[in-house]
Amino acid sequence: MLHLTDIQLQDNKVFLSMLSHVLSVDGFYFSTTYDLTHTLQRLANTSPEFQEMSLLERADPRFVWNGHLLREFAAQPEIHRFATPVMHGFITMHSCSINGKCFDWLLVSRRSCFRAGVRYYVRGIDSEGHAANFVETEQIVHYKGSKASFVQTRGSIPFFWSQRPNLKYKPKPQISKSVNHMDGFQRHFDSQIISYGKQMIVNLVNQKGSEKPLEQTFAKMVNSMANGMVKYIAFDFHKECSRMRWDRLQILVDQLAEQQDEFSYFLVDSDGKIVTQQEGIFRSNCMDCLDRTNVIQSLLARRSLQAQLQRLGVLHVGQRIEEQADFEKIYKNAWADNANACAKQYAGTGALKTDYTRTGKRTQWGLIMDGWNSLVRYYKNNFSDGFRQDAIDLFLGNYSVDEVEPASPLHVKKDWKFLALPIIMVVAFSMCIICLLMAGDTWTETLAYVLFWGSASFGTFAIILYNGKDFVDAPKLVQKEKMD
């Protein structure tokens, strides 16, 4: 540290704060005895040689978030036992009882460290076919030595598109016109088929407005790929469930029922014999792959769990999970917690629509909380996510600090507009307060003052909004998109 210049010492403090910021986010897990990065089915289909490997050697690199930090350990086999892979996501475990039969129920979500980042700054895929916000979620049941699991994935729409923040509440998605979409698209699904088998895409975006081109492009590319292993279904979540008609989600579940029965689930008996294997997977997405996606995944997972518990003898013939009040509460809360964890890690706030996941119905309070979370997301996405993105890129090794680098990207000169913005906003807010204090006794006069100064304030803000991209908190360390 003694050989560093004052500027380098200052930068070093910023870099350390970035690492601390990443590590302060909930959801990092490790085990010294169990491989958290693989599903039960993958572990059951490995060789004896694989089982003898160290956890670092055998871990799925997609889900090892400290892989960059362990790079020097990886080159020295003799110290592998000291290197523990760390997974990021969500894990919950519950000991449950139905009909007096006790079983363990687990939910595990593994976030990929490839194309990792935050909402708006990381969308679509990169040139290697890695999708943004890719999460593998596994539901596991242990009962009398038997084990069952059902796996689903979520991930950003897998072609090249972006949605950069610009102070607008909902920036318009932009589909890149300068790249070969099919190349990355093909790579993504080739990898998915190798890892999971058949693919059933469940696209939950709006089929009108700014999201419509994304849905149309996704459907067109699946048809162009003409791969019998990949099927596609679009379900306009917001349209179908408008006016609190959340019971209409059953329409989608019924549409997917035959495909789900074909995919089955993984089951191994108490003797270690594989009874059934999961032959395919549901790949769900909305825009963020958070709120709508989590609701649908919880419904599909419940349907699979119903079949598993009946086959294991926990549920009697004709019994439904929904009728088991104690377990149903555990189940709904766990999936809602899963939604919150994934949302905080990607969008910076808890998930939306969790009132439905927790209670099975939409509530007015849930709408209010969704509004609050949406406002918090708006602020973070525009004014603090640049730092979060830089922190993730530094932690994962996407940006490497070079001591001989002449100028740090952290030092970006800001023009007068950045100094003017807070002043303008303070003045506009002050005018609104003053107009209320100076208003006459009648509501008419008060309203006139509010409308006048409110319009002036709004006009000022509109000017700022016109060139809003200059004011958002953009990442500094990795300026160039991998897809360019």
Image (spheres, rainbow, N blue to C red):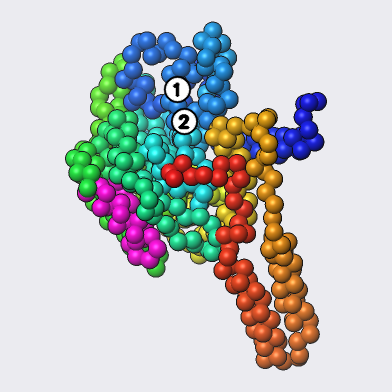
As measured in the structure, the alpha-carbon distance from the residue carrying label 1 to the one carrying label 2 is 8 Å
Viewer-nearest residue: 310 or 302: 302
State the image coordinates of residue 346 (x, y, percent, origin top left): 52, 45
Q: Which mark is residue 63?
A: 2
Q: Nearer the viewer, residue 19 or 360?
A: 19
The residue beneath circle 1 is: 59
In this picture, residue 154 sits left or right of residue 225: right
Magenta stretch contains residue 106: no
Task: Identify the residue at image location x=50%, y=39%.
Answer: 116
Part of the protein shown in magenta: 201-223
> Which residue corresponds to the image point at 74% horizontal and 67% vertical from the top-left?
423
Answer with left or right where residue 330 lies relative to residue 23. Answer: left
SS at mark 2 in the image: helix
Number of other residues with Cα within 10 Å of mark 2, as a class: few under 14, some 14 to 19, many 20 or more: many
User: Looking at the rendering, which quadrant does residue 269 occupy?
Assistant: top left
**In terms of secondary structure, where does tag 1 sit?**
loop
